[in-house]
Image: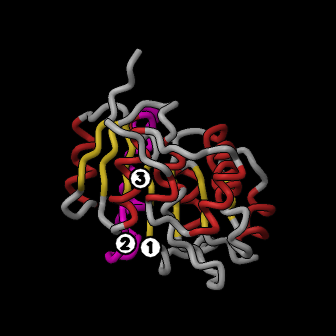
Amino acid sequence: METVKFDELQLDERIIRAITEMGFEEASPIQAQAIPVAMEGRDMIGQAQTGTGKTAAFGLPQKVDPKVKKLQAIVLLPTRELAIQVAEEMRRFAKFMHGVKVLPIYGGQDIVKQIRSLKDGTQVIVGTPGRVMDHMRRKTVKVDHVLTVVLDEADEMLNMGFLEDMETILSQLPEERQTLMFSATMPQAIAEIARKFQKDPVTVRVIKKE
């Protein structure tokens, strides 16, 4: 398999600029396969372990419009640590996309502070399903402009008891959206979510060499 360079992937040139500055030139296998699918707007199931560089696989192709001060992308993941880490990484990718705000939201953090940040016109939220749902209930997160939703480490979210929350969130998002799912394993419940909430998804698999 030959290597794919990021500048061959039709990404926004501001994003290319940011990752070049971060020292990245070549896409990892999951990135090389997933980015073109995501760029096309297709739904996707990515089977990949942690450490394969999947944050960039869904973070780089985001079609977020900095001029629109409304929520456009939601990334759901299992833990606050991951929320903080992924939000940080996505901010670095968006360094030259002036006006793009990425906010991590998770339990155990002052909700009032989160609500204030959300009012500022955050385009991307990265959070745990329980807290994202909490905000949706309070109407502090409005989802009518969401174009993309990412389920990261879907099997882990399942293990942590977030299945119902994930389903509730997905069922309330706009029909015309892109759903990207990443999971190291494919338990029945996760396959079921894919069947229910994805349209004709492309499956991308990367087996990590030990």
Checking the image for residue 166, the label placed there is 3
Task: Give the quadrant of the N terminus.
Answer: top left
Which element type, helix, strand or loop, lies under badge 3? helix
* x 52%, y 62%: residue: 74
What residue is at 48 percent from the left and 62 percent from the top?
A: 61
Q: Is residue 82 visible?
A: yes
Image height of 86 relative to 176, above or below: above
Query: In 3D space, how far apart are the residues under numbered discs 2 and 3 (Cα atoms)?
Result: 15 Å
Provide the secondary structure element on which disc 2 rests: loop
Whether residue 17 is situated above or below residue 100 in the rendered picture: above
How are the colours assigned in the image?
A: secondary structure
Rendering coords of residue 62 (x, y %): 51, 65
Q: CA distance from mark 2 to mark 1?
A: 5 Å
Per the rendering, the mark at residue 147 is 1
Which one is in front, 57 or 81?
57
Between 189 and 182, the one lying in front of the other is 182
Per the image, the residue denoted by label 2 is 177
The amino acid on which the numbered mark 2 sits, given as a three-letter code, is Arg
